[in-house]
Image (cartoon, helix red, strand yellow):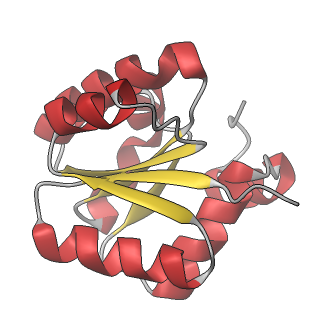
């Protein structure tokens, strides 16, 4: 029996957590939600090992500080972090977000389809597809 991918959704916005979590659960992902880095750490300490972390980051530079903390928590587990950034303008800082720990970026507003496509690409390491979205510097 194939194991479902585990995704941890971290956001201080309850509506975002609910919408993202629900969209992922409908696609048969195992989803846990956390309101901040401390709650995320508690989820992991209780035995939940995510295959992907989706982090609502907010605007630069505050969002980058949160992302660095979250990605630092999951670096030993090698769980990639999909950063949900506050606006399309934040996408102009791709390299800075990646240096802060993002595997890839998704700007608000986004559709459920965009979220699911990005999550699948990161989970299944579709580097070619990520390059077409992010440019040539995806590693």
Residue 11 spot, x, y in % from top left: 21, 55
On the rendered image, what quadrant is the N terminus found in? bottom right
**Residue 100 in view:** no
Q: Quadrant of residue 103?
A: top right
* Lateral position of residue 28 relative to residue 25, left or right: right
Image quadrant occupied by the C terminus: top right
Q: Is residue 9 above or below residue 22?
A: above
* Number of numbered labels in the structure image: 0
The residue closer to the viewer here, 92 or 61, is: 61
Residue drawn 85% across and 59% down? 2
The answer to whether 59 is drawn above or below residue 29 in the figure is: above
| Residue at 18 percent of width and 38 percent of height | 39
Left or right: 40, with 97 as reference point: left
Residue at 45%, 61% in the rendered image: 31
Q: Nearer the viewer, residue 90 or 30?
A: 30
Above-or-below relation of 23 to 5: below
Q: Is residue 129 left or right of residue 32?
A: right
When asked about the image quadrant of residue 20, the answer is bottom left
Q: Residue at x 69, y 60 (%)?
A: 4
Residue most extreme to the top: 76
Residue 86: percent from the left, percent from the top? 22, 61
Q: Pick whichever, 23 or 69, lies toward us.
A: 23
Provide residue 68's location: percent of width, then percent of height: 30, 24
Taking depth in this image into account, of 71 and 46 the one nearest to the observer is 46
Q: Is residue 75 visible?
A: yes
């Amino acid at each position: 029996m194939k194991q479902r991918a585990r995704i941890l959704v971290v956001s201080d916005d309850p509506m975002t957590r609910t919408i993202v979590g629900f969209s992922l659960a409908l696609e048969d992902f195992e989803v846990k939600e956390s309101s901040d880095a401390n709650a995320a750490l508690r989820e992991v300490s209780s035995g939940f090992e995510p295959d992907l972390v989706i982090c609502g980051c907010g605007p630069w530079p505050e969002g980058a500080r949160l992302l660095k903390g979250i990605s630092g928590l999951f670096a030993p587990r090698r769980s990639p972090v999909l950063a949900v950034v506050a606006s399309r303008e934040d996408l102009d800082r791709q390299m800075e977000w990646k240096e802060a720990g993002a595997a890839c970026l998704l700007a608000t507003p986004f559709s459920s389809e965009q979220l699911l496509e990005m999550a699948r690409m990161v989970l299944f390491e579709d580097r070619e597809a990520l390059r077409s979205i992010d440019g040539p510097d995806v590693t």
